[in-house]
Image (spheres, rainbow, N blue to C red):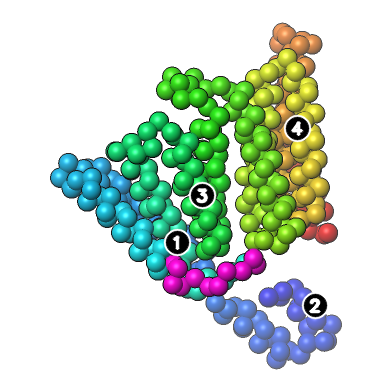
Amino acid sequence: MNIPLFEKLHSGGQLSDASFQKIKVADNNRLFSLYWELRTILYLGILLLSGGLGILVYKNIDTIGHQVILAFIAAVCMSSFVYAHKKKPAYTNNKAISPNSFFDYIVLLGCLTMVTFIGYLQFQYNVFGTKYGLAAFIPMVLLFAAAYYFDHLGVLSMAITALAAWAGFAVTPSTILQDNDFNSETILLTGALLGILLVVAGLVSTKRKIKAHFEFTYSNFGANLLFICTLGAMFMYDQVYAAYLLVLTGICFFFYKKALRDRSFYFLLILTLYFYTGLTYTIIRGLFEMSSDIGGVYLACFYFIFSAIALIIFLVKMNKKIKAS
């Protein structure tokens, strides 16, 4: 309740003493929501269950047997999906309402055990051979299908992670994986293209109104991938770092407009931090190129002090602007 507003109404005579006292009593005795606490405990319970099963299997692998373990994982997975299928509401392109408090967690358990089952098959029996991309592609497709079928944001995050893993395997030769000598240029380019694809997927979801509430998840992964890959290229190819700073500026401008349009302080915060990192790298390089002795160190210290203050002031002002819009 907005108690200061009621106090103004009471002092102005628009609210009687008896009514004001009832409002204060109701505010003091209102119920405290445990929604997020319970959700956190349930998610933690699913993760602990999955981790505990993994430890149990690892310590008793010789006595239990691989077939028994696979059968148990498959049983948990199928039971979870059967329950979720029976309880799920009818499919809609809008946000679906969960039928009960445990539905989301059962879906998450089913997807986790599904990934575990496929990973176990590959690890123990090498069913996909050296086709690591296929081993990542199948879980990715199943996770995307489950995310849309059951309308689950957590599963969508898992699917996007699987998509990134599949893209990494698809563009990286197996010899490089075996030698642990990654082609950074290829991986950075793939990450940037994947980031663009995810941002576009978010925009299409909103425009076509197909699970529009998935847009934030797509954009979140896409934005971080784009920023990280651009900064990575900027640090790696320092001969043309200024060009990558321009690319970073363009990406920041795009997400700045999006943050204002969606009134999202989160996107404003991350674009500011990423741009500050790139700009700081450029300025510090310039300072030490102009003065490589102790003078460059002093200038860098002054820069960090004043830029940090400016960064805080900027974020505070932009937060007020977003709230006021």
- Mark-to-mark CA distance, 1 and 2: 49 Å
Residue kind at label 1, given as amino acid type? Val
Question: Could you say which is closer to the camera, residue 277 or residue 75?
Answer: 75
Q: Residue at x 64, y 27 (%)?
A: 232
- Mark-to-mark CA distance, 2 and 4: 49 Å
Which-is-in-front pick, marks 4 and 3? 3
Residue kind at label 3, given as amino acid type? Val
Which-is-in-front pick, marks 1 and 4? 1
- Residue interval drawn in magenta: 84-94
Residue kind at label 2, given as amino acid type? Lys
Badge number at residue 187: none
- Mark-to-mark CA distance, 4 and 3: 31 Å
Q: Residue at x 46, y 46 (%)?
A: 138
Relative to 214, residue 24 above or below: below
Q: Quadrant of the N terminus?
A: bottom right
The answer to whether residue 307 of the structure is visible from this angle is no
The answer to whether residue 323 of the structure is visible from this angle is yes
The secondary element bearing badge 4 is classed as helix
For label 2, the residue is 8
Relative to 87, residue 270 above or below: above
Question: Could you say which is closer to the camera, residue 37 or residue 153?
Answer: 153
Disc on the earlier residue, 2 or 4: 2
For label 1, the residue is 107
Q: Give the side of residue 199 with respect to residue 146, left or right.
A: right
Q: Is residue 74 magenta?
A: no
Disc on the earlier residue, 3 or 2: 2
Which-is-in-front pick, marks 3 and 1? 3
For label 4, the residue is 248
Residue 13 lies in what quarter of the image?
Answer: bottom right
